[in-house]
């Protein structure tokens, strides 16, 4: 369970909270928020890896679309349609968890003040309210809340729709855009639902607290995608709160990014009504001139403003101190809630751990009992088989012993009965062997005597030979 008690409290207090979500890379354009772009095609040319597409929703309905820069921590543009002017309501600022922690299971915007420690690296890729505290800048809305009503207005109070603006510039931006849209754009577009608005900011090198980029300029692009349509661009330099320059959308695109295209087909450039565009420009010029005259003719107002400024300077330390005390109180409350959440989490974790261990032991015990019960019939059968095999072995041994006992006298009787036969049959063989031996002995004696006689004759001849006279040579 990753959501904190404070987050649950936020849900209970604001059941229709904003459900803006980060659009996945495999989704076309801005997914269900493509309806806020002419031809349902988002601007082209914004392709940096740190650009994040957000479909801002509220009560499960898309309200506007935002392209957010995680590098500059500000939105580059918000695409919306005019609904109806309304006074600003209660501000409940939200953040987008998926920008800082893509693995988080919070797939929708949540109240920043109550998010607790449920989001890893919170503020690493987006601005937080703490980045604006004590900076001298306000959270200026690109999609002004004054141009929206009801749920559409509530959805605008997200930090992914805000840029750092000085209080005067924020007031001037909202006033100018409100008047231009209501008095110049809406009256000259035949179908209000076909009026597509893009409000954006160009980041500068100046940063708030070394993190959030301050806009170099603010711009508005309008496209009336209807019969006798037109397109228009407006730019307000942040260095001059009273500036408001009009230009073509093509000229505006050149000031933004190389290859930028804000509207599909240049907002039907081939069928645009130049007469309508001139009427819009004239209305814008009248609005701009009226503001300038009002500025030149209100010297008394300036003097009163100076008095208010001095009073504001005197009261600022006390206001800042009050803000600090409120901030500390809020942090203490958050800490207490977070501490209680940790305690509850630890207790519940311990209880669940004990229950899980008890359950595992019970399962193991039941498993062992089941195995023993299952093995009893098998063991009984094996014992019966072994008893039967032992009985057969005993019978076999008894039969072998009986056969051995019975086989002894039978063999003895057979050998005894065969003795006379074998004895009588052996007499001729014995006599033959005796005769052969006697004859052989006699012949051996005769042969020995002949050999001795021959030897004596040879010896006598050898001795007497020298004494025998030799014959003549002719003999």
Image (tube, grey):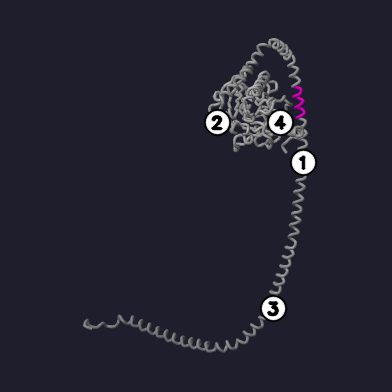
Q: Which mark is residue 265?
A: 2
Q: Mark 4 and mark 2 in contact (Cβ < 8 Å)?
A: no
Closest to the camera, between mark 1 and mark 2, is 2
Q: Secondary structure at mark 4?
A: helix
Q: Position of residue 438 (x, y in %)?
A: 48, 87
Distance of label 1 from label 4 (alpha carbons): 43 Å
Q: CA distance from mark 2 to mark 4?
A: 31 Å
Residue 193, position in %: x, y?
Answer: 64, 30
Can residue 211 be seen by looking at this rendering? no
Q: Earlier in the sequence, mark 1 or mark 2?
A: 2
Horizontally, residue 292 falls left or right of residue 341, namely: left
Secondary-structure class at tag 3: helix
Choose mark 1 or mark 3, whichever is in front. 1
State if disc 2 and disc 3 touch (CB < 8 Å): no
Q: Nearer the viewer, mark 4 or mark 3?
A: 4
Q: CA distance from mark 3 to mark 2?
A: 115 Å
Mark 2 or mark 4, which is nearer to you?
2
Say whether marks 4 and 3 touch (CB < 8 Å).
no
Identify the residue at image location x=62%, y=30%. Answer: 194
Residue numbers of the magenta segment: 324-334
Q: Which residue is mark 1?
A: 350
- Tell which tag, 1 or 4, sits nearer the viewer: 4
Q: Mark 3 highlights which residue?
A: 402
Residue 53 seen: yes
Image height of 1 relative to 451, above or below: above
């Amino acid at each position: 369970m990753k959501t904190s008690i404070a987050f649950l409290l936020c849900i209970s207090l604001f059941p229709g909270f904003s459900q803006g979500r980060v659009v996945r890379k495999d989704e076309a354009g801005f997914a269900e928020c493509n309806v806020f772009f002419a031809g349902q095609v988002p601007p082209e040319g914004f392709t940096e890896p740190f650009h994040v597409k957000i479909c801002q929703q509220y009560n499960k309905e898309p309200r506007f679309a935002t392209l957010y820069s995680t590098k500059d921590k500000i939105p580059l543009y918000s695409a919306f349609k005019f609904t109806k002017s309304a006074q600003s309501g209660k501000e409940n600022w939200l953040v987008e968890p998926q920008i800082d922690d893509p693995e988080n299971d919070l797939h929708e915007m949540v109240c920043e003040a109550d998010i607790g420690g449920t989001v890893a690296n919170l503020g690493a890729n987006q601005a937080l309210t703490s980045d604006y505290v004590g900076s001298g800048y306000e959270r200026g809305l690109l999609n002004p809340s004054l141009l929206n009503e009801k749920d559409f207005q509530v959805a605008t109070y997200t930090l992914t729709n805000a840029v750092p603006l000085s209080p005067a510039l924020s007031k001037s931006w909202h006033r100018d855009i409100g008047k231009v849209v209501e008095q110049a754009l809406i009256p000259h577009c035949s179908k209000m639902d076909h009026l597509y608005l893009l409000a954006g900011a160009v980041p500068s090198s100046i940063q708030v607290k070394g993190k959030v980029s301050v806009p170099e300029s603010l711009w508005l692009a309008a496209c009336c995608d209807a019969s006798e349509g037109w397109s228009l661009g407006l730019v307000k330099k942040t260095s001059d709160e009273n500036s408001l320059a009009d230009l073509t959308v093509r000229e505006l695109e050149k000031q933004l990014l190389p290859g930028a295209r804000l509207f599909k087909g240049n907002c039907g450039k081939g069928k645009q009504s130049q007469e309508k565009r001139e009427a819009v420009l004239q209305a814008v010029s009248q609005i701009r001139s009226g503001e300038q005259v009002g500025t030149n003719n209100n010297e008394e107002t300036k003097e009163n403003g100076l008095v208010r400024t001095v009073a504001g300077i005197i009261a600022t330390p006390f206001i800042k101190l009050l803000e600090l005390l409120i901030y500390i109180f809020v942090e203490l409350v958050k800490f207490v809630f977070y501490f209680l959440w940790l305690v509850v989490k630890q207790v519940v974790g311990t209880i669940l751990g004990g229950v899980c261990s008890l359950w595992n032991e019970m399962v193991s015990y039941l498993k062992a009992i089941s195995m023993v019960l299952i093995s009893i019939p098998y063991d009984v059968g094996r014992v019966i088989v072994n008893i039967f095999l032992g009985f057969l072995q005993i019978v076999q041994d008894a039969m072998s012993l009986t056969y051995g006992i019975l086989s002894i006298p039978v063999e003895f009787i057979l050998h005894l009965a065969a003795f006379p036969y074998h004895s009588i049959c052996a007499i001729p063989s014995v006599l033959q062997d005796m005769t052969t031996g006697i004859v052989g002995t006699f012949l051996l004696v005769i042969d020995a005597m002949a050999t001795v006689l021959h030897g004596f004759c040879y010896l006598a001849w050898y001795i007497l030979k020298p004494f025998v006279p030799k014959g003549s040579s002719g003999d």
